[in-house]
Image: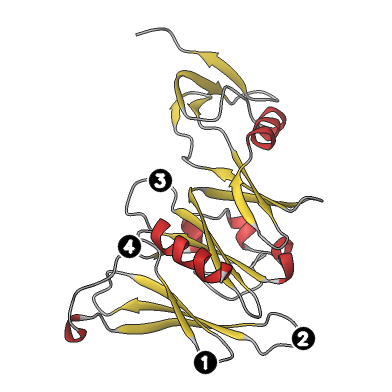
């Protein structure tokens, strides 16, 4: 029951709307990828299929359970390719031969489920939206995290940290860029997994690897990138 409620909430959060179009008007889908998703040694694998509509307007994912049940999952206007929202060195570790589903080694069998990262195409400038899909023997859950360019995954004693930037920094002068802090998302397992922005972890990561002037983009400061460490520069008032 919890899984059904969580799935219904995830669909609503992703903007899935019931269609009133007739069956004849429904889009036809062609297969881009078919992936086998083993959960553990005691259960048959699920099958994940990535499909594109014939009008090229949307990409969707369907998961076929060993029972034969098929679950469609839509991501806003469609899926984005992983190369649009995952750093190349991280993407090279993908355990799946897929352009759309990322199985990171540090997410292997997390919380007893198969965990995939997928990217939603929001149709807006900037990084695609990040979504985590968890497939278990009897469960199917999705979690959305908003726009994020994923650069690092860290396994900790509490769970997994997904690290990236909501917007990407822009160069505004020689050795200077906009202030765009990293965000750390804490993905905690257990019976009731959760994915949420972690303020303390985000602050600590930025102080150690970037600079820190708050959790959001700011226009009154820029970042000096030349030198051993980045530093903040206060911009003159307009």
Kindly identify which residue carries mark 3. 126
x, y percent for residue 201 = 69, 37
**Looking at the image, residue 170 lies above or below residue 38:** above
- Mark 2 or mark 1, which is nearer the start of the sequence? 2
Q: Secondary structure at mark 2?
A: loop
Q: Secondary structure at mark 1?
A: loop
User: Which residue sits at x=50%, y=21%?
Assistant: 222
x, y percent for residue 108 = 72, 68
- Mark 3 or mark 2, which is nearer the start of the sequence? 2
- Mark 4 or mark 2, which is nearer the start of the sequence? 2
Kindly identify which residue carries mark 4. 77
Tag 2 and tag 4, C-beta contact below 8 Å: no
Kindly identify which residue carries mark 2. 41
Kindly identify which residue carries mark 1. 68
Give whichever of 127, 226 is nearer the camera: 127
Label 1 CA crowd tier, 10 Å (few <14, some 14–19, many 20+): few
- Mark 1 or mark 4, which is nearer the start of the sequence? 1
Label 4 CA crowd tier, 10 Å (few <14, some 14–19, many 20+): some
Snapshot colouring: secondary structure
How far apart marks 1 and 2 lie (CA) works out to 19 Å
């Amino acid at each position: 029951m919890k899984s059904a409620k969580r799935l219904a909430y995830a669909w609503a959060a992703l903007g899935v709307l019931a269609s009133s179009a007739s069956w004849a008007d429904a889009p036809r889908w062609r297969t881009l990828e078919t992936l086998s998703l083993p959960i553990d040694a005691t259960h048959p694998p699920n099958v994940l299929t990535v499909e594109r509509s014939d009008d090229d307007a949307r990409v969707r994912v369907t998961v076929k359970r060993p029972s034969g049940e098929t679950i469609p999952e839509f991501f806003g206007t469609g899926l984005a390719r992983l190369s649009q929202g995952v750093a190349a060195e991280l993407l090279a570790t993908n355990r799946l031969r897929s352009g759309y589903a990322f199985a990171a080694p540090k997410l292997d069998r997390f919380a007893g489920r198969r965990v995939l990262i997928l990217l939603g195409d929001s149709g807006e400038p900037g990084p695609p939206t990040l979504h985590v899909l968890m497939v278990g023997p009897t469960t199917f859950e999705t979690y959305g995290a908003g726009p994020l360019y994923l650069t690092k995954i860290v396994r900790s004693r509490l769970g997994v940290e997904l690290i990236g930037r909501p917007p990407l920094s822009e160069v505004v002068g020689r050795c200077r860029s906009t202030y765009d802090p990293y965000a750390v998302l804490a993905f905690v397992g257990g019976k009731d997994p959760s994915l949420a922005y972690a303020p303390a972890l985000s602050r600590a990561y930025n102080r150690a690897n970037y600079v820190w002037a708050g959790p959001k983009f700011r226009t009154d400061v820029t970042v000096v990138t030349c030198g051993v460490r980045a530093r903040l520069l206060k911009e003159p008032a307009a």
